[in-house]
Image (cartoon, rainbow, N blue to C red):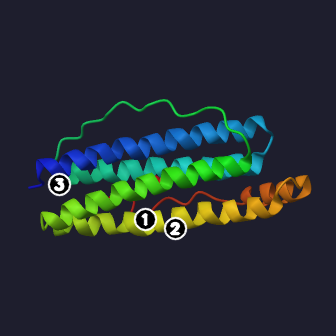
């Protein structure tokens, strides 16, 4: 039986993952407005991955016979400054999510809840990857600076990103 403390953190995490999807949906819209369709595609894939993360937590709560308690999702920012600043905001947000996942892992370890601890390891790995992806884009955009040709080349690169459903999809 999962503890109430663990269950509350898992329900909070469902909200954070759906907010992540909402944030990236907003970033996608901003890039679409700028006619940077490759960047918009990148964030489209990103938002679908975040939805999957939320559903993975949601399904886990059901799997352990807990009660799913969906929470309100706050409005994300809608105006951004530059492509670089979007990725900087994305990295900042991912670090916030990583800290939240670590907090869940700490709780699971403290409770000797090995099942939840094992479930969370997928997210620990995923967060490392997400932060590395954001950092890589930041470094490239810093190199590109105000070079329009470089920006369009990077846009073409990001247009190639393809959504791959997470595996295993549920728990
Ligand atoms: Fe699911 Fe990017 O945190």
Which picture quadrant has residue 32?
top right
Q: Circle 2: is it few (<14), some (14-19), or many (20+) Cα within 10 Å?
A: few
* Helix, strand or loop under label 3: loop
Which image quadrant: the C terminus?
Answer: bottom left
Relative height, residue 47 to residue 171 (above, below): above
Earlier along the polypeptide chain: callout 2 or callout 3?
3
Front in this rendered view, residue 119 or 110: 110
Q: Secondary structure at mark 1?
A: loop
Q: In screen coordinates, is 36 left or right of 125?
A: right
Q: Position of residue 105 (x, y in %)?
A: 27, 63
Disc 3: residue Cβ within 8 A of ligand 1's nearest atom = no
* Horizontal and vertical percent position of residue 2: 12, 54
Circle 2 or circle 1, nearest the eye: 2
Quadrant location of residue 142? Answer: bottom right
Label 2, label 3: how many angstroms apart (C-alpha)? 27 Å
Q: Are marks 3 and 1 in contact (CB under 8 Å)?
A: no
The local crowd at label 1, few if under 14, some if 14 to 19, many if 20 or more residues have their Cα within 10 Å, is few
Residue that appears at 80% across and 57% down = 156
Which residue does the image show at 32% across and 33% down from the upper left?
71
Locate the N terminus and report the quarter of the image it occupies: bottom left
To which residue does mark 1 refer? Answer: 167
Relative to 96, is 81 above or below? above
Q: Residue at x 32, y 52 (%)?
A: 57
Mark 2 — residue? 129
Q: CA distance from mark 2 to mark 1?
A: 15 Å
């Amino acid at each position: 039986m999962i503890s109430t403390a663990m269950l509350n953190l898992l329900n909070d995490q469902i909200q954070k993952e759906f907010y992540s999807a909402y944030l990236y949906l907003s970033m996608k819209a901003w890039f679409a407005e700028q006619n940077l369709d490759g960047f918009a595609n990148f964030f489209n894939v990103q938002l679908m991955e975040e939805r999957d993360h939320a559903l993975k937590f949601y399904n886990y709560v059901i799997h352990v016979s807990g009660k799913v308690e969906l929470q309100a999702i706050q409005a994300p920012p809608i105006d951004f400054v530059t492509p670089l600043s979007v990725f900087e905001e994305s990295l900042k947000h991912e670090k916030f999510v990583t800290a939240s996942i670590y907090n869940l892992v700490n709780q699971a370890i403290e409770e000797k809840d090995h099942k939840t601890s094992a479930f969370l390891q997928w997210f620990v790995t995923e967060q490392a990857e997400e932060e590395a992806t954001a950092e890589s884009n930041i470094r490239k955009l810093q190199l590109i600076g105000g070079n329009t040709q470089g920006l369009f080349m990077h846009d073409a690169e990001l247009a190639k990103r393809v959504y791959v459903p997470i595996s295993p999809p549920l728990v």
